[in-house]
Image (cartoon, coloured by chain):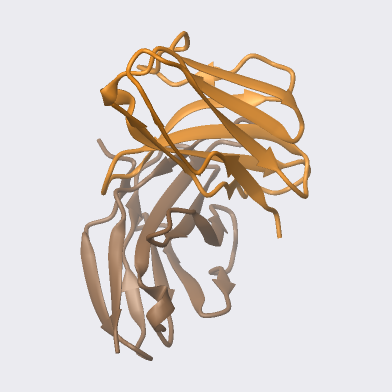
Amino acid sequence: GAVVSQHPSWVICKSGTSVKIECRSLDFQATTMFWYRQFPKQSLMLMATSNEGSKATYEQGVEKDKFLINHASLTLSTLTVTSAHPEDSSFYICSGRRRGSRYEQYFGPGTRLTVT
Amino acid sequence: AQKITQTQPGMFVQEKEAVTLDCTYDTSDPSYGLFWYKQPSSGEMIFLIYQGSYDQQNATEGRYSLNFQKARKSANLVISASQLGDSAMYFCAMREGGGSNYKLTFGKGTLLTVNP
């Protein structure tokens, strides 16, 4: 199967600091990666789509200066939450689409961010 | 208007029985696809099954089958012979259009509980 990892799996940070979340495709090349956030007992909301080597495309309402996404290689994408606030506390999930695959997205295990 | 509607916030089923999780969708795009994902309490999203709008037959994957009724715009998930490990949140999702940068829109999910 296609495996995606995320690091860290959970993080607690103080308000005003920045935190970086890594998303890695372990056994495939992810030409496109997606970042979602999920509030408790709610659905996944797409934040942004990124292609390797290109700037990310953000969804309406997502602040690109606050949620910095880098997709530097075919196996690594990072999401940096800058100047985090308590309302940024959420479950962040990444997914990757494998080169040549039909339409499947393979999801990482998620990162739980708590901002105090 | 919601693009993906899951009308069952919660469902209960007895072990070894079959259960149907409902999903209706709304799109004017002739090319689309429907996914079902399972999210256990641990948080990772597990791909279950996919149905393309042009696929002639209903998709099946082991104990999972997708009852695709195009005219009704419904894509219900049928789980046969339920197991205790099937207890989880289930999300229906849709991609619209083709190309490499398609997006997934998720429904609000159905929490399935399998009783022994």
| Position of the N terminus of chain B by quadrant | top left
Above or below: residue A55 compared with residue B60: above
* Residue drawn where x is 33% and y is 79% of the image: B19
Question: Residue B78 is drawn in which quadrant?
Answer: bottom left
* Residue drawn where x is 32% and y is 18% of the image: A15
| Spot occupied by residue A17 in the image (x, y as percentages of width and height) | 41, 15
- Rendered orange, the chain in question is A
- The answer to whether one can see residue B110 in this image is yes
Above or below: residue A9 compared with residue B42: above
- Viewed as shown, does residue A63 lie left or right of A32? left
| Spot occupied by residue A52 in the image (x, y as percentages of width and height) | 73, 24
| Position of the C terminus of chain B by quadrant | bottom left
Above or below: residue B3 compared with residue A32: below
Question: Residue B51 is drawn in which quadrant?
Answer: bottom right
Question: Residue B56 is drawn in which quadrant?
Answer: bottom right
- Rendered brown, the chain in question is B
* Residue drawn where x is 47% and y is 12% of the image: A64
Foreground residue among A60 and A11:
A11
| Spot occupied by residue A100 in the image (x, y as percentages of width and height) | 78, 44
